[in-house]
């Protein structure tokens, strides 16, 4: 299976002012495209050619950095575009997800605080996450193109804290970007869908 850049599930203007057209033009049209192209080149002739994306990400971790970095980032970005929507974010979560968060992480407010803290303290490029591990929701952070997938967990929400995701709109204010992501962008319905699939 070769990698392909999907269209954004909304227009490039749809997430403004929290994520601008210019950011999405660079981030989706150029950065994600580069992961797709470089990943397809790196895959050629390897044992992972023809495997599913998740198999490639898990299988190449620690074995083939060129394949892993690009496949990992392709996987992360495919979800990232769907983890956001216009007029998203906020504290109104689908019931089953809200209940699970309250039970596993204390409350929605505490989850948001811990998620933002994980993103703010990820040194250098990387991601912060909600993931399901052993049936429970956990907060995590990873460097570069890694994700909870390589730790035996299932990602249900991730925020890209590479500078290419926020520098045009927020400059060095990563915490402000994380707050805007949680308050105005997260597609909680998609998170709930992934949570249900990970726990069924
Ligand atoms: Fe990115």
Image (cartoon, rainbow, N blue to C red):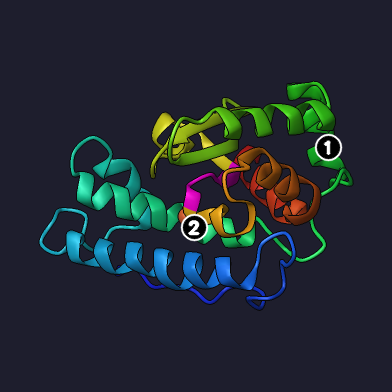
**In the rendered image of this protein, does residue 88 appear above or below residue 153?**
below
Judging depth in this view, the residue of 163 and 40 nearest the camera is 163
Say which residue appears at 21% left-offset and 50% top-offset.
Answer: 66
Say which residue appears at 66% left-offset and 32% top-offset.
Answer: 115
Query: In the image, which is nearer the foreground, mark 1 or mark 2?
Result: 2
Say which residue appears at 74% left-offset and 56% top-offset.
Answer: 185
Image mark for residue 77: 2
Please state the horizontal and vertical placement of residue 116, each as a whole percent of the image.
67, 34
Give the SS element for disc 2: helix
Judging by the rendered image, the residue that carries numbered circle 1 is 98
Q: Report how many numbered discs are placed on residues in the image.
A: 2
Give the SS element for disc 1: helix
Please state the horizontal and vertical placement of residue 90, each as a whole percent of the image.
85, 47
| The N terminus - image quarter | bottom left
| Span highlighted in magenta in the image | 156-163
Q: Is residue 161 magenta?
A: yes
Give the side of residue 55 with respect to residue 78, left or right: left
Judging depth in this view, the residue of 150 and 167 nearest the camera is 167
Give the side of residue 42 with respect to residue 106, left or right: left
Q: Main secondary structure of the magenta part?
A: strand
Q: Earlier in the sequence, mark 1 or mark 2?
A: 2
């Amino acid at each position: 299976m070769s990698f392909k850049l999907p269209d954004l599930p909304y227009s490039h203007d749809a997430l403004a002012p929290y994520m601008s057209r210019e950011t999405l033009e660079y981030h989706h049209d150029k950065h994600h495209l580069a992961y797709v192209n470089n990943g397809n080149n790196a895959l050629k002739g390897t044992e992972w050619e023809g495997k599913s994306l998740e198999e490639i990400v898990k299988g190449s971790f620690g074995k083939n950095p060129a394949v892993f970095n690009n496949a990992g980032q392709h996987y992360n970005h495919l979800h990232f575009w769907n983890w956001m929507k216009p007029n998203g974010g906020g504290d109104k979560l689908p019931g089953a997800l809200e209940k699970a968060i309250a039970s596993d992480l204390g409350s929605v407010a505490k989850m948001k605080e811990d998620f933002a803290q994980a993103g703010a303290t990820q040194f250098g490029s990387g991601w912060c996450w909600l993931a399901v591990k052993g049936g429970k929701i956990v907060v995590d952070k990873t460097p570069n193109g890694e994700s909870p997938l390589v730790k035996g967990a299932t990602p249900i929400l991730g925020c890209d804290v590479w500078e290419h995701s926020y520098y045009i709109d927020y400059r060095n204010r990563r915490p402000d970007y994380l707050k805007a992501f949680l308050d105005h962008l997260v597609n909680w319905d998609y998170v709930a869908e992934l949570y249900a699939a990970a726990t069924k």
